[in-house]
Image (tube, rainbow, N blue to C red):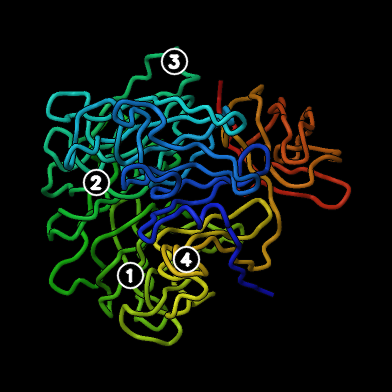
Amino acid sequence: MKHFNLLSLLVLLALCLAAARPAHAQTGPNGDQYEACANCGIQVGGYIFGQILNLNTNADYQFCSVGPNCNDGWAPIAPLLLGPDKNFYGVTYYGGAGGLCGGGNGCGTVWEMNPYTYGLTTLYSFCMAAGCADGYWPDGGLIQGPGTTLYGTTSRGGAHGYGTVFEIVTASGRAAPTYPLTTIYSFSGATDGAYPSGSLTLDSNGDIHGTTTSGGANGDGTAFVITPGGTLKSVTSFGGSKNNNGSNPNGNMQEVSGSFYGTTAYGGKFQQGTIFKVTKAGDISTIASFDGTNGATPLAGLVLGTDGNLYGTTSAGGSGESGTAAGGTAFRVTTKGKLTTLQSFSADGTDGYAPAIGLFQDVNGNFYGLTSVGGATGQGGFFSLSEGLAPFVETLPASGPVGTLVTILGDNLTDATSVTFKGIEATFTVVSSNEIDATVPDGAKTGTVQVVTSGSTLSSNVPFTVEKK
């Protein structure tokens, strides 16, 4: 049975402004949940610079703690990434030690934070290169590449001014204070698109998939594929005269069985947004269109649930209402396009409304998200959504050769009696109720990791890929 519950975040909501733009909650290695919020925290001189908040303990990191001009960045608008080294990684839209962009607000940063000590290290400040050739205003979250490499995007700057795709090594991959960033692709604003938004996705070949909100043949955005070396392999344009395949894609795409699924904010059969599928060859098809009654204007990407279905939010519509004045929805869609509204947010905002970000599935099986505004304080709220999906475990990293030390995250792991990699027994150590360290055993093959406890058998949410040495 599903239920919907708006959780009370007293500290967070008391500090957030109405225009707050929070990112996904993310479970840390200690089992606590962490949240990045762009317009939350201490107010100084009319500005609120953002914070990373532990939702369980209310401990936090306040941005703009390093001077003279918020050298540690401010406005952390993108989702948090938990790396294999158990540190959080993310970006800020403004601040940093680089050039000044948009009225002197700074050009953004890449940062690392220890979830236990809240010590933050700025790995890179954007607009360090002449003409901001290294990009500025990173808008999408970081994703894990091979080893200590991270990939991300900037929404502006680069060789042509229309945004970039970049790679950077983590602190564990290079001695301080050098954390080199490489711009691997600059968008031209023409056929390849302009202004990338949302997180990237890696396929099984290591190629990088993403979207731009504008540009392309019709000016309505693109879906692109580039190699890690920066070669554009394919690009497909949204929009056109009928606009049935949608326009202005937002957020990340989710890979399922070799195809990639995402959302567009506009266009489609009813001109209120779509859910699309794009193949590796670049062929786009609309699998569902929003009509207002089932939601409208999705502004975030999709998450793949452990049941094989996709989950997401719309920022408007729902409750049988038409137009963009309703409060938005949380939805489930199958890869065949069967769309189900799971929750319609009240147009009066009592339970929060306008969820402008996607959902996050925790290891307990539930989904979590945030509304931008509304709720008891009018500042938005954090909600949970249960669809009866079973708890699972998550591996960090999600791939590696035999002998790799893997961190397994979950709930109630203290009495674990067995860890297997596709049926092959592994040696392991229980670190805490939320964490196990295991070594990829000899003979392991790519497949599901399972943890057996006294009460259940927990499977990994994604297969662990066993790499060749």
Q: How many marks?
A: 4
Q: CA distance from mark 1 to mark 3?
A: 42 Å
**Disc nearer the start of the sequence (1/3):** 3
> In the rendered image, which residue does mark 2 sit on?
234
Q: CA distance from mark 4 to mark 1?
A: 20 Å
- Residue 205 visible: no
Mark 2: which secondary structure? strand
**Looking at the image, is 335 positioned above or below residue 230?**
below
What is the three-letter code of the residue carrying label 1? Answer: Thr
Q: Nearer the viewer, mark 3 or mark 2?
A: 3
**Disc nearer the start of the sequence (1/2):** 2
Pointers 4 and 1 in contact (C-beta within 8 Å): no
Q: CA distance from mark 4 to mark 3?
A: 41 Å
Q: CA distance from mark 1 to mark 2?
A: 26 Å
Q: CA distance from mark 4 to mark 2?
A: 22 Å
At which x and y percent is residue 127? Answer: 21, 29
Which residue lies at the image location 50% right of the left edge and 56% below the top edge?
14
What is the three-letter code of the residue carrying label 3? Answer: Arg
**Disc nearer the start of the sequence (4/2):** 2
> In the rendered image, which residue does mark 1 sit on?
297
Q: Nearer the viewer, mark 4 or mark 1?
A: 1
Q: Which mark is residue 174?
A: 3
Q: Which mark is residue 312?
A: none
What quarter of the picture does the N terminus occupy?
bottom right
> In the rendered image, which residue does mark 4 sit on?
335
Which residue lies at the image location 46% right of the left edge and 37% below the top edge?
62
